[in-house]
């Protein structure tokens, strides 16, 4: 059974810091990995999708890396801003399913202080 | 347009009521999903529809009844719910082809069962 773990569970940083969120998964037979952002009481916003054959993806101040063999992904946020405050979730899609079953981590709650 | 629209945004119902949640997308996606999310927990998959056919049912109680009347619309019919069913219900959609399988989420329906 695939298990996804995110560390840390919560993070509070001053504005302007660069930071790294971690995601690990137990079964490396994944198809892809997706990072989401969720604001309180809201739906999920897709940030980045990394295919299993890729090493990283970048979008603006965000960079996500994937090391499938070690079961790890990181989300790097450069020059953090108060608007980045949210919960960040990673989710992996297992290779054997023809459907689209995502397994989510518990999330990292990020607070960026002005 | 990457929008998934869910209605209503909030719903309060008694345990004897019958209500429905609605989800709509116009991105041409042929896979649609229902998730349940409790506070401070990741989303839990409930159902997956692929080409308007139910492909995954994660052993959800029969008081939740999904329906996919066409490729743009997904409903979740609710009947005789329990207070522990109170949660944020999220709808998502994606292309069926796994390589392009970014899931787009709606803002959710906040359900309270009294």
Image (tube, helix red, strand yellow):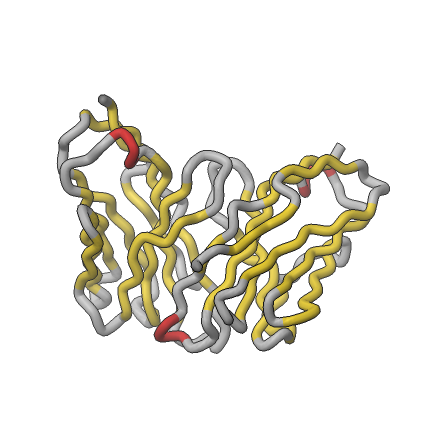
Question: Residue A72: horizontal and vertical position, in percent?
Answer: 24, 57
- Residue A39 in the image: above or below residue A36: above
* Numbered disc total: 0
Query: From the image, which quarter does the C terminus of chain B lie in?
Result: top right
Question: Residue B71: horizontal and vertical position, in percent?
Answer: 60, 71
Side of B53 where B39 appears, left or right:
left
Residue at the extreme top of the image, as rendered: A114
Query: From the image, which quarter does the N terminus of chain B lie in?
Result: bottom left
Q: Residue at x 67, y 67 (%)?
A: B68
Q: Residue at x 58, y 42 (%)?
A: B88
Question: Residue A52: horizontal and vertical position, in percent?
Answer: 27, 70
- Residue A11 in the image: above or below residue B92: above
Residue at the extreme right of the image, as rendered: B16
Q: Residue at x 63, y 66 (%)?
A: B57
Residue B2 location, quadrant: bottom left
Side of B45 where A62 appears, left or right:
left
Residue B34 location, quadrant: bottom right
């Amino acid at each position: 059974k695939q298990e996804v773990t995110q560390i840390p569970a919560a993070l509070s940083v001053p504005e302007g810091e660069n930071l790294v969120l971690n995601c690990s998964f137990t079964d490396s037979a994944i198809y892809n990995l997706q990072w989401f952002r969720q604001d309180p009481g809201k739906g999920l916003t897709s940030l980045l999708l990394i295919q299993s054959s890729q090493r990283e993806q970048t979008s603006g101040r965000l960079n996500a890396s994937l090391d499938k063999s070690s079961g790890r992904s990181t989300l790097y946020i450069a020059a953090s801003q108060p608007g980045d405050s949210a919960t960040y979730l990673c989710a992996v899609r297992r290779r054997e399913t023809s459907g689209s079953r995502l397994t989510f981590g518990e999330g990292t709650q990020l607070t960026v202080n002005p | 347009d990457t929008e998934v629209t869910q209605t209503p945004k909030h719903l309060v119902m008694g345990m004897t009521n019958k209500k429905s949640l609605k989800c709509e997308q116009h991105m041409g996606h042929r896979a649609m999903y229902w998730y349940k999310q409790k506070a401070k927990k990741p989303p839990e998959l409930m159902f997956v529809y692929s080409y308007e056919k139910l492909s995954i049912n994660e052993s959800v109680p029969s008081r939740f009844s999904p329906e996919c009347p066409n490729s743009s619309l997904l409903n979740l019919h609710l009947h005789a719910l329990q207070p522990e069913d109170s949660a944020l219900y999220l709808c998502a959609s994606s292309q069926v082809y796994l390589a392009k399988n970014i899931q787009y989420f709606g803002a959710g329906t906040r359900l309270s069962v009294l």
